[in-house]
Amino acid sequence: LVSRENHPARSVVRVGGVPIGPDTMSMIAGPCAVETPEQTLEAALMAKAAGASLLRGGAFKPRTSPYSYQGLGEAGLRILADVRAETGLPVVTEVIDPGSVEMVASYADMLQVGARNMQNFALLQAVGSAGKPVLLKRGFSATIEEWLSAAEYIAQRGNLDIVLCERGIRTFETATRNTLDISAVPVAQRLSHLPVIVDPSHSGGRRDLVLPLTRAAIAVGADGLIIDVHPQPKVALCDGDQALMDTDLKGIADIVSLLSPLM
Ligand code: PEP
């Protein structure tokens, strides 16, 4: 279902009216985690000013350590819905277990399946039945074939509104949090008709790498970006080291505004 063999034209996925696919460069941006209404609104306004057309924000955080911030849960989803009402930005947010898919879908415009859950097959099937577009992140140890098979689980349930996201894989290199597998973008685009976007924040794990990795993503033909922003990264409860501040967003805004007339 997700293979390009039977579907040669590349697909466009619409999220709350925003297209993601060929000839677009849609940017999803916002805080890694929803912390407070003020922080989420501020991050959303920064993201919008930089050219983002969709808001990201985690209310359920699948953290490696159980002692790390786990998110606000449904209260965080309510904050995201309020910020959507205020900014007009459709909401992309993560769901981490099959039992909460319906509830998360009642707030979200797009359901995110994170790297750690890429092969949670019950979750994939549940989001496939939820009637919302899905952002499927690549597992950090998953091959491209495994990633596409995960997408197939979603598609089998009748949902072809799937966007693939390359977010870096685990390699021997320790200088970066993960290694952005930039070649995965054209490889996945050749194998599948689904749009492929890049997460330059979680791949490098470092603020200074977000702009260069964004350039790489655009150069290789990615269909979009998902970027962490935070009004005060120093006090962020999750992944502050990779979050862009207002001052860093100028570079991203320049790229997005340069590209827009070409799309
Ligand atoms: C995220 O985008 O909030 C996230 C946790 O990313 P990943 O699943 O790629 O680690």
Image (cartoon, helix red, strand yellow):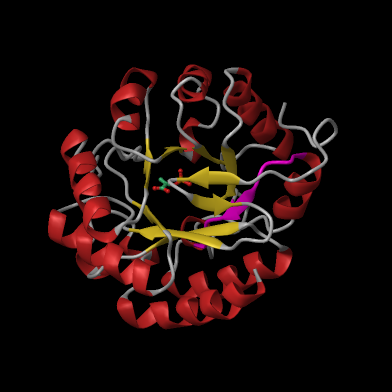
Q: How many marks?
A: 0
**Residue 248 picture quarter:** bottom left
- 158 in magenta: no
**Quadrant the N terminus occupies:** top right
Is 16 situated left or right of 198 in this image?
left
Is 209 situated left or right of 47 in this image?
right
Residue at the spot x=79%, y=43% of the render?
9
Residue 259 appears in the picture as rendered: yes
User: Which region shows up in magenta?
Assistant: 192-200
**Farthest front residue in view:** 17
Residue at the spot x=29%, y=54% of the render?
238
* 27, 172: nearer the viewer: 27
Is 54 situated left or right of 171 in this image?
left
* 65, 21: nearer the viewer: 21
Q: Vertical placement of 51 versus 88: above or below?
A: below
Q: Measured from the top left, where is residue 220 in percent x and y?
A: 72, 64
Q: Vertical placement of 199 versus 247: above or below?
A: above
Q: Measured from the top left, where is residue 222 in percent x and y?
A: 66, 59
**Quadrant the C terminus occupies:** bottom right
Q: Measured from the top left, where is residue 84 in percent x and y?
A: 27, 52
Q: Measured from the top left, where is residue 26 in percent x and y?
A: 53, 60
Residue at the spot x=59%, y=20% of the render?
158
* 173, 229: nearer the viewer: 229
Residue 244 appears in the picture as rendered: no
**Residue 194 picture quarter:** top right
